[in-house]
Amino acid sequence: MQFCIMEKLNFPLYQFSLKSKENKTFIFDAVRKKWLVLTPEEWVRQHCIHFLINQKAYPLGLIQVEKKLKVNKREKRYDIVAFNPQGSIALLVECKAPSVPITQDSFDQIAQYNFALNSDYLMVTNGLEHYFCQMDFEQKKYIFLKDFPSFKSIMK
């Protein structure tokens, strides 16, 4: 079986379920419970999901991936959100392919999504660089964090 080789990312090593079919590599998404074509952005998204579950102890059942939202009357899709036990969005993640640099546009995109979602925490990543922020809604700004908070720490 031939698998497409993806680049090593700046995440811990994880075990992924991969399969090859019709010259395409597929990766299993535990959140959506389905096989997806493995693209560079999906590679980053799957690493980020595993990071949240395995390193930061976010419950699988409180994570959603690639759902629609309305931004300025246009349909968009966010990459990952994690909910708190009360059902509010606690975390919004924007994933880019490793070849896509993280720029001000990346932050503008996640900020636009967050106008609709009101997440307290944001993460922007291309798998190589990660930016973690906490929202200050009163001052209308991000507070950059050195590391991303664990599920337990944001539930306080």
Image (cartoon, rainbow, N blue to C red):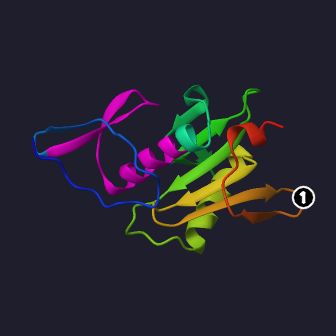
Quarter of the image with the N terminus is: top left
Q: Is residue 68 visible?
A: no
* Location of mark 1 (residue): 138
Residue 10's x, y, as percent? Answer: 46, 61
Position above or below: 152 against 48: above
Residue 84's x, y, as percent? Answer: 72, 33
Q: On the picture, is 21 further left or further right than 122?
A: left
Magenta segment:
24-51
Is residue 82 located in the magenta-colored stretch of the structure? no
Say what amino acid the circle numbered 1 marks. Answer: Glu
Q: Is residue 128 visible?
A: yes
Quarter of the image with the C terminus is: top right
Query: In the image shown, does 67 or 2 lie closer to the viewer?
Result: 2
Query: In the image shown, does 106 or 133 lie closer to the viewer?
Result: 133
Q: On the picture, is 21 further left or further right than 17?
A: left
Q: How many marks?
A: 1
Q: Residue at x 78, y 36 (%)?
A: 155
Q: Residue at x 57, y 44 (%)?
A: 55
Q: Provide the secondary structure element on which disc 1 rests.
A: loop
Q: Residue at x 52, y 46 (%)?
A: 51
